[in-house]
Image (cartoon, rainbow, N blue to C red):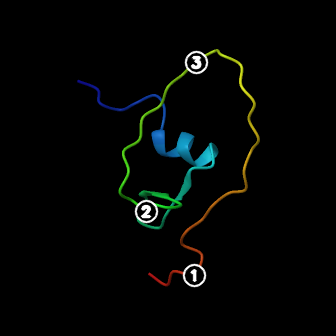
Amino acid sequence: WNYHGRYSHKKIATLSGLGGIGKSCLFLHKEYGPRVRLGTLFTDCPFDFEPTEYFSPCIDCDL
């Protein structure tokens, strides 16, 4: 069995502006922190998208 995915849910969530990846390599949501579950839906439906500024929650962290 090969359990390695083709796409990183963390990377897609980061690129969509939902949060960032912390020093612990966990995805950190802007409001809920690491307490989220991620899923990705691929579609060919057109929609408006504005890239957001990269969110890094660990700028002031000294870990």
Residue type (three-letter) at the residue carrying disc 1: Asp
Q: Earlier in the sequence, mark 2 or mark 3?
A: 2
Q: CA distance from mark 2 to mark 1?
A: 15 Å
Gap in angstroms between the C-alphas marked 2 and 3: 27 Å
- Looking at the image, residue 60 sits to the left or right of residue 51; the answer is left
Q: Residue beneath label 3, please?
A: 43
Do the residues under discs 2 and 3 have CB atoms within 8 angstroms?
no
Q: Position of residue 7 (x, y in %)?
A: 48, 32
Secondary structure, mark 2, is: loop
> 34 left or right of 29?
left
Residue placed under numbered mark 1 in the picture: 60
Which tag, 2 or 1, sits closer to the chain's start? 2
60 lies above or below 55: below
**Near-viewer residue (5 or 28):** 28
Instruction: Determine the residue positioned at 68% across, 57% down.
Output: 54
- Counting other residues with Cα less than 10 Å from the Cα at mark 1, is it few (<14), some (14-19), or many (20 or more)? few
Please tell me which of labels 1 and 3 falls first in the chain. 3
Q: Position of residue 23 (x, y in %)?
A: 47, 67
Circle 1: element type = loop
CA separation, marks 1 and 3? 37 Å
Residue under the point 63% across and 44% down: 15
Q: Which residue is mark 2?
A: 33
Task: Give, as a three-letter code, the residue at label 3.
Answer: Thr
